Image (tube, rainbow, N blue to C red):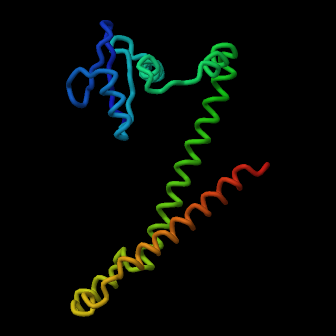
């Protein structure tokens, strides 16, 4: 559920869930923490989310925290809506790819940890409770685990490379 932020005519922003006024910096932090926000004009109900997010980006530019290249910004202004539509489609596609890669990586790590015995399965838990002496005797060797992790990282990099090559292939 999106956090509803109301913008008043005096430009103040009011978080309706927390019942308090917030700054652009606080809204930025909310978004960085994974919250989805919706900004609406308090009087008219007009949707102002895009305007507010753009304002946050501009403030970051002013404070040199983002530093979008000037040439990019010139092209954005020069080509107007057509360029903006292209950027939106490209960004959406890129973000979907990142999320997909993260999910795939999580799946691979989860699968590997289950196979290696790091992520207990219900059957494994029952066995471990019944045999505490065996569990202590079977403690993994830290050096061997480091080697396994290094190997997994290499395999993960290889998978990411393969995924990037597949995305780059013409369709």
Q: Is residue 97 above or below residue 45?
A: below
Quick check: 42 left or right of 165?
left
Q: Name, please, the residue furthest toward the top.
A: 10
Quick check: 54 left or right of 5?
right
Count of marks overlaid on the render: 0
Q: Name, please, the residue furthest toward the front.
A: 143
Depth check: 146 or 117 in front? 146
Residue depicted at 30% across the width and 18% down the height: 13
User: For residue 76, which quarter of the picture?
Assistant: top right
Quick check: 88 left or right of 32?
right
Q: Position of residue 135 (x, y in %)?
A: 27, 88
User: For residue 117, which quarter of the picture?
Assistant: bottom left
Q: Is residue 47 above or below residue 168?
A: above
Q: Position of residue 126 (x, y in %)?
A: 27, 86
Residue depicted at 57% across the width and 45% down the height: 96
Q: Position of residue 111 (x, y in %)?
A: 47, 72
Residue depicted at 32% across the width and 19% down the height: 6
Depth check: 57 or 43 in front? 57
Work out which quarter of the rendered image holds the N terminus and state it: top left
Q: Name, please, the residue furthest toward the right.
A: 170
Depth check: 104 or 62 in front? 62
Residue depicted at 42% across the width and 79% down the height: 144
User: For residue 25, which quarter of the picture?
Assistant: top left
Q: Position of residue 119 (x, y in %)?
A: 36, 74
């Amino acid at each position: 559920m999106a956090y509803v932020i109301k913008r008043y005519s005096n430009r103040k922003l009011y978080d309706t869930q927390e019942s308090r006024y917030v700054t652009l910096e606080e809204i930025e932090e909310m978004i960085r923490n994974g919250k989805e926000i919706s900004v609406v004009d308090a009087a008219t109900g007009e949707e102002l989310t895009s305007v507010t997010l753009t304002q946050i980006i501009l403030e970051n530019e002013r404070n040199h925290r983002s530093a979008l290249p000037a040439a990019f910004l010139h092209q954005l202004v020069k080509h107007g809506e057509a360029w903006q539509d292209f950027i939106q489609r490209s960004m959406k596609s890129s973000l979907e790819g990142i999320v997909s890669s993260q999910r795939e990586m999580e799946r691979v790590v989860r699968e590997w940890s289950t196979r290696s015995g790091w992520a207990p399965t219900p059957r494994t838990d029952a066995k471990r409770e019944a045999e505490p002496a065996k569990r202590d005797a079977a403690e993994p060797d830290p050096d061997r685990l480091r080697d396994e992790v290094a190997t997994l990282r290499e395999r993960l990099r290889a998978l990411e490379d393969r995924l990037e090559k597949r995305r780059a292939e013409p369709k």
